[in-house]
Amino acid sequence: MLKVQGLTKAFKTQLLSPAQVVLTDLSFDIQGQRTTGFVGVNGAGKTTALKCILGFIHPDQGQISFFDQGPLTSEMKSQIGYLPERPYYYDFLTALQFLKFHWDLTGGGAGFEQRAEIVLDRVNLPGVGKKALRSFSKGMLQRIGIAQALLREPKFLIFDEPMSGLDPDGRILIKEIIQDEKKRHTTIFFSSHLLGDMDELCDNLVVINQGKLVYQGALQDFSKGQGVEKSFRDIRQQLGVRQ
Amino acid sequence: MIALRALIRISFLEFLRDRIVWICFLVGVVLFGFSLILGSLSIQEQQRIMAHFGWMALQLSGLGIGLFLGANWVHKEMDHQTCLLVLARPVSRAQFFLGKYLSVLSLLFMIELILAVFLFGLLRFKMSPVFFLQVFVGTFLEVALIFSLTFFAATFLRPAMAFLWGVGFFLMGHWMQEVEFFGQKTGSAFYFSLGKGVSWFCPNLYQMNWRTVYFLEHGVSETQVLWVLFHSLGWLLLTAVAGILIFRRKDLV
């Protein structure tokens, strides 16, 4: 579904300062119809990697291939649903206007009303279509963000920290949505530093530390029955990283 | 095309809600009020003062909107990360750039048109609506040019620098004739080349300055209107294309 090979990216914060390497030769595969967690502490390079994957950042080196076909194209983009970390929405729009905007961005066409109703139900936001986004709580905004990602029935969902900043109820709702999508055999790739969530949701894991790949494979092999959090701590200890 | 239309519509509504747009609009209206007061104080020059002040109001409010919106757009997109949601869709960076660019241009046109209609109602001396329209076109194109240069600069400069870039082009564009004239007068080859160089690397705003009673009464020659149209459209196109090329390579961190 997604193949990342040798991804390397460094940023220059100032003109004369040396470039800071954020990703180093990062390679991993995301298998179709599986849920893969992208794990790493804050600043490990998860968001940068996701931004490289989606073409927002140009990598210095490396190749990214989608659906076994090659680099990201417009057609491929219409099969992907994405939710960024801490998204900002045009809060003067109503939920339906917001979804219509994203419907039009993917080419418009008939059937919007039915589809909008389905996704709003799916993210547990029925009957809010005419409410302005400025009246939404953080959890509701996160769910409307997921609704826009699901709007075109994508084959592949990419979420960046979907549970970050949510209260326990909000997190449970997002987890339920991800589990629902999992049952529909959608490929899901999401990043999080909340490791407890990974145990419940993921089949596979990609673990990075300081921009380098630490682990890629089945969650069970990584957690070895002791939970992702414990295994992650052990790995960081082995790598000599201070907790 | 559907995506671009949607992008222009939503961006237009977004920019319309920007406080700076309304502050600049208000400055224009206040200057109109000033023109009425100042005009009433003079005995014979009432209409002349109102015309000069009125057009200045139009120019200043347009420049304010163009400079502030143009300088901040990339920074705002990065800050809010709204561009990520849009660019994750089948929307190219060129479309995204054009959507934002055209939405501000439409907003500028709308604001300038409202102020111009207001001004037309205030001026009571004999003038042809065609001449008034010519002066409006010149004023709008000048404002659009400065906006376009600032919008382009925002793709590679910080907002404050992009703002100064726009102001710099505005000043150079108006002083171009003088710079060229003094370049010739000094007799120095360096200053002569500098004067010539400015006219090559800067739009000639001096030629668009028709904001006087003379032009309202006598109009502008067709040749000059055509020259200004081509000159402005050329610069608008150039800055838009250059902006797209830079924005395509930009890392949206």
Image (tube, rainbow, N blue to C red):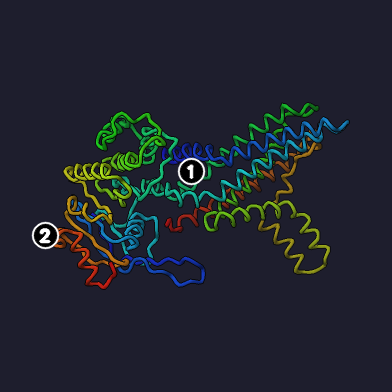
From this view, report whether residue B146 is shown above or below residue A144: below
For mark 1, name the chain. Answer: B
Counting from the top left corner in percent of width and height, residue A130 is at 37, 29
Label 2 neighbourhood size at 10 Å, few (<14), some (14-19), many (20+)?
few
Who's the residue at 78% across and 26% down the image?
B124
Quadrant of the drawing holding the N terminus of chain A: bottom left
Which is more toward the observer, B115 or B144? B115
Q: Residue furthest left?
A: A225
Tag 1 residue: B99
> In the depicted view, which residue is nearer to us: A14 or B215?
A14
Subunit ID for the residue under disc 2: A
At label 2, the amino acid type is: Gly
Mark 1 neighbour class, 10 Å CA radius: few under 14, some 14 to 19, many 20 or more: many
Tag count? 2
Residue B27 position in % (x across, y down): 67, 38
Q: Nearer the viewer, residue B178 or B227?
A: B178
Q: Position of residue B21 (x, y in %)?
A: 58, 39
Query: Measuring 69% from the left and 45% from the top, which residue is drawn there?
Result: B227
Where is residue A22, by image quadrant? bottom left
* Residue that label 2 marks: A225
Image position of B57 (left or right of B48): left
